[in-house]
Amino acid sequence: MKQPSCRISGAPLVNVLDFGQQPLGNGFLLPERFADEYFYPMKTGFCESSMMFQLLEQPALDKMFHEHYAFYSSTSSFMERHFGNFAQQLMKSKFLASPDPFVVELGCNDGIMLKNFVDAGIRHLGIEPSRNVAEVANSLGVRTLSEFFCPDVAEKIVREHGQANAFLAANVMCHIPDISGVVEGIRTLLKPDGVVMFEDPYLGDVVEKISYDQIYDEHVFLFSAHSIRHLFGLHGMELIDVQPQITHGGSMRYILSHAGAHPINESVPTLIAKEATLGLHRQETFDVFRKRVEKSREDLVSLLRGLKLKGKRIAGYGATSKSTTILNYCGIGSETIEYISDTTPIKQGKFTPGMHIPVKSYDAFLNNPPDYAILFAWNHAEEIMTKEKNFMQSGGRWIVHVPKVQVLG
Ligand code: JHZ
Ligand code: SAH
């Protein structure tokens, strides 16, 4: 096999963490597809030149994002509020103060964020290649183009709508392997005084909380302020602000503009200095991370094994993409986990990628609760714990693996 190289610097990438053969994170499937299920070798590397943490290999984009895409953003009411606040923050800012502003969002999914701009009567466009979720967005009045964003699409948008005042993205920039093409597209699309605001799971949180389940096929990168400042700097753009978010277990919102267009907030050098202390720009940090990931796996496997020996019933809560990494990396299947409950209709009645645990509706959890529920949607813990007070009051226990493997309650 050709030596993998950094998608930004071209330098050779060294494997820092090997997860073995992994299926698609969102590849929920029916038994007739078990025999020809797709797997790929999931390894991660780090480039000290671009400071980018990345997968060595990623499946083809159309294997992951298509008309049966399983993740619908609006399954979380907390995230609906979060994106409502994100939209409000932009609407109140100087960036939309001009007459007839235009907002573009990459990976708008079912319209969770852009519907706020529809309500406010603001000109907008979503770019969403997964047709099923794009259709939901369109049905809500969110104008959505079903395409993969790239420099050509950026030019087409400028021709048809003019340049954008704001370019938004949430949990999508880290999915796109040709990230340099995306930044070039943004440069074409953005007005000279426009703003880019995007957020993604933050490498600092992943390393600190050992949340290695943020690593799966879709997440080709895990970003830091170091890597983002460097990447956009190569294209004449500047990181002007950073705002930590609690969403998805710890995310970072990056705010950028054309170089020199806006002042740089003090938050940027402060975070860069913090990251330097944590060593997020150095390969050796990931050698330590690997050992901690391996320990987390041992702890989880031994906890679950002990509970099964005691005859306890265990089910999963939230058939997340993240759980695909946990289950396949730890080798946990239906001998241990009876079922996983999930509110997303397209996942229900199917089986989890690779380990083939049945995914059931939320009713399965309510009507047949287990002794222990492993919280695969741990990033939504607050929302879920509030909803599931009864489970704990009737003696049910939660298992979480972040920031350490433990039983709650
Ligand atoms: P959740 C996906 O990751 C994939 P996942 C993607 N790569 C990404 O980056 C993030 O989203 C943004 C269910 N649920 O948000 C709904 C309940 O059953 O952790 C979802 O299937 N009951 C684009 O899949 C899943 O859990 C509930 O009460 O890791 C949550 O998935 C709630 C709140 C959720 O993302
Ligand atoms: N922004 C939403 C959705 C995240 S899911 C949220 O935070 O909840 C990621 C979305 O990005 C998917 O719906 C996927 O289809 C889309 N996507 C993947 N590659 C893309 C690309 N090159 N251009 C635009 N969208 C893309």
Image (cartoon, rainbow, N blue to C red):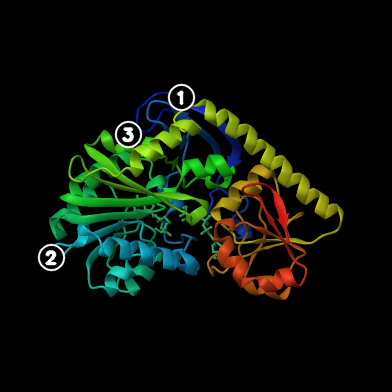
Whether residue 191 can be seen here: no
Q: Is residue 99 left or right of residue 15?
A: left
Kindly indicate the quadrant of the structure image that contains residue 367: bottom right
Q: Give above or below for 296 relative to 111.
A: above
Which one is earlier in the sequence, the residue at label 1 or at label 3? 1
Distance of label 1 from label 3 (alpha carbons): 23 Å
Question: In the image, is 325 to the left or to the right of 85?
Answer: right
Q: Nearer the viewer, mark 1 or mark 3?
A: 3
Using the numbered discs, state the Cα–Cα distance from disc 2 to disc 1 in whole angstroms: 51 Å
* Depth check, front residue: 2 or 140: 140
Q: Quadrant of the C terminus?
A: bottom right
Local crowd at mark 1 within 10 Å, few (<14), some, or many (≥20)? few
Q: Mark number for residue 230?
A: 3
Of 275 and 23, nearer the camera is: 275
Q: Which residue is mark 1?
A: 3
Identify residue type, mark 2: Pro
